[in-house]
Image: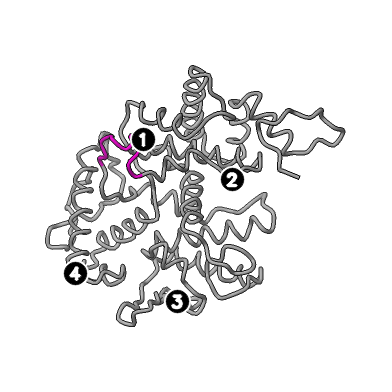
Amino acid sequence: MSPPHLSDPVPRPQSSTDLFDQQREDWRRDPQVAFDAWLARQHFRRSSAQVYQAQWGLFLEWLKARQKSLVTVDTQTIADFVAGLEIRKPQRVRYLRLIERVLDHVREVEASSTNPARFIAQDGEAAWRNARDNEPTGFLHHAERAALIAHLFSPVQALSRAQRWKERRDRALIAVFLGGGLKTGEAAALTVSCATPGSPWITIDSTNPMLVRRTRLAPFASAILDAWLAERRLVGLAGDLVFAASPSGRPMHKATMLRAVDALVDAAGIAASRTSRASPHTLRNTFAADLFESGVEAELVGQWLGFVQTVSANRLYRAWQTWMEQQNSRVTEEPDPAAPLLPEARTDRRFTRKAGSAES
């Protein structure tokens, strides 16, 4: 029997209405109401939810004006919508991410495997990319980093057993990106033997013995990883991968990691305020930035990141300095006179504090 689709005739409701049947009907009848219900289940902050509601509403209005629906929407339709937005490329990416995520849910409900928004996102030559991109090297702000870390430590509630261990896994995954500077491929291949409970050091293996390295996790990342390894043992996942995709122990796909980052960044309430996507690479950059601010030499930061050449670490250091200068020039709020003094970066990679004055 072929699976039902969103475009199929709606069957007469039965005494025990199937959940997916009801959701299919909801999305077809009123996609705005269905979206609001879906949004409520994501547990976003109110400010983020309001932004997403406005974005989705604009998309639905655009579809209606062209006599399109979620049933008939296709790749070209979405491409035209995103390309027509009078906004910067990072903001177009945010619109596309929202549409992609919602259509993922709708296609799951209707048992379909195609998502036209994903084809747009993966098309490197798509017209929507012809917009100014003002953040070539991204980092998290201090407040964004703090909010994300706070969410990683927040209670895991109202989840099934299967959902619970995956949530714990995803939080630990984000922790090693943000607090260890790992790449997605390195995280996917990380084995339990590479980490020792209670130790901040983890070993990053490589097929090339010259590229095997150790990196030091930030205290928060070490604690979250330890908690996940304990949970992993209790769940009894097969194999030796730290971040297994399933109980059978198969490795996580990069796309799954990207979705995990998106979901946790959204849940932490920082996605809506950003003009660019907080990717695993953004978190890796932020790990380096935290070390730079702490006075760690660029060469050592490069070693922990796995850079083969010192020039790469110096380039990242200069990119961070430029980014910091840009952020400082955009500050519009009055400084808090009670706030502690922050380190001031100097070009010699050392740090000092201004005496007798607070920095803005």
Q: Earlier in the sequence, mark 4 or mark 1?
A: 1
At x 33%, y 56%, the residue is 286
Q: Which residue is the site of mark 4?
A: 310
- The residue carrying mark 2 is 113
Tell me which numbered mark, 2 or 1, is placed earlier along the sequence: 1
Query: Within 10 angstroms of label 4, few (less than 14), some, or many (20 or more) residues?
Result: some
Q: Considering depth in this image, is 333 or 246 the residue closer to the camera? A: 246
Q: Residue furthest top?
A: 65
Mark 4 and mark 1 in contact? Answer it, CB < 8 Å: no
Q: Position of residue 152 (x, y in %)?
A: 50, 55
Q: Main secondary structure of the magenta part?
A: loop
Q: Which residue is at the front of the view, 340 or 205?
A: 205
Q: Quadrant of residue 33?
A: top right
Which circle's residue, 3 or 4, is located before the other in the chain? 3
Segment colored magenta: 124-134
**Distance from the alpha carbon under mark 3 to that under mark 1:** 40 Å
The Cα atoms of the two marked residues, 3 and 4, are separated by 27 Å
Which residue is painted at 22% across and 58% down in the image?
Answer: 316
